[in-house]
Amino acid sequence: MVRNTVIRSIAIRTPSEGEIREIAEHIVKAYGFNKFMKLKIRVLANEVLKLLKPYLPYKILSDLTNIPESVLCRYVRGNIIPSFEQAVNILAKISLSIDIDYLLKELVEEEKSNIIDLSRVLKDPYIIRLLSIIICLKTIGKDVSKIIATAEAVTPLATLLSIELNAPVVLIKKKAYPGIHYYTVIVPRSPKDTEILYIDKDLISRKDSLLIISDVVYTGRTLKTILDILEKTKARIVDIFVILGLGDEWRNRLKNYDIKVLTHLPPPF
């Protein structure tokens, strides 16, 4: 059974040893093949600890990682960096322990608005960075070649993922420019209103493996239309992450896709 403990605005869960071992093996396979990649994951572990320190005391971080508080303090301050094996341990345990669903719900509630604007919810660059690291760890081994940002609100997150995964970002646009060929996505908003979205044709090929990042899903109509168009490009969709799911209407429309919703708000919103 998963046990949740709320600490300030972050909740933690206790993953099983099997979960930890599985993601640790993925990290080693993806980053353990040369000195540069090993160093990269060691520095990344330091960065994650530094990002979490404002929210979690050393005692909790120590319980999560099984590393003494004094050593964690030196990692956070940047005085030393962990070994590759220790870094894998830190990232595997923390990526599985941080309850992103709880964290994002807290950020939505802080806005105190009837209209959910994800660009305001994700205004903290440190939160965006933490999200990018966790999503990156969840996509290890999937050989992502392009990142599809379905809305401007997720562009900063997609950009950070682009750096980590070494994959270009393709932004779905609401405006067409002369001289560029597009796939067009027509999304009905009401019986009398439609919206046209544009995807650059020359930026996606059948050889690509796509990671899709979407902001909010409610009816699922927009995301389903985008996915239908992307499938026509013959590119392979390897993962789909949605930051915020509203209600459950979207589930039936997107039932054929493995949608990973980071946080879910039941009605009323």
Image: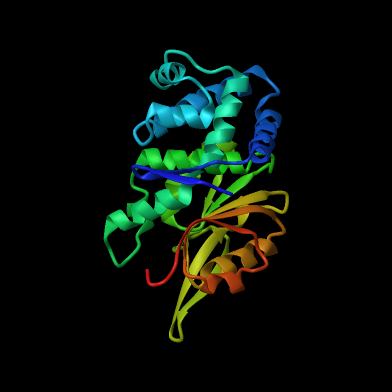
Does residue 162 appear anywhere in the picture?
A: no
Residue for point 48% across, 39% down: 160
Does residue 132 appear anywhere in the picture?
A: yes
x and y percent of residue 141 in the render?
Answer: 69, 39
x and y percent of residue 143 in the render?
Answer: 68, 41
In the depicted structure, whether residue 72 falls above or below residue 152:
above
Specify the quadrant that holds the C terminus.
bottom left
In the depicted structure, whether residue 1 falls above or below residue 251:
above
Residue 175 or residue 108, whichever sits in front? 108
Judged from this view, the residue extending furthest toward the bottom is 191
x and y percent of residue 40 in the render?
Answer: 56, 24
Residue for point 47% across, 26% down: 62
Residue 192 left/right relative to 221:
left
**Coloured how?**
rainbow
Residue for point 68% across, 67% down: 256
> Which image quadrant for residue 70?
top left
Residue 189 left/right relative to 35:
left
Residue 235 or residue 216, whichever sits in front? 216
Total numbered labels placed on residues in the image: 0
Residue 14 or residue 159, whichever sits in front? 14
x and y percent of residue 102 in the render?
Answer: 43, 51
Judged from this view, the residue extending furthest toward the top is 79
Residue 114 left/right relative to 34:
left
In the depicted structure, whether residue 36 falls above or below residue 187:
above
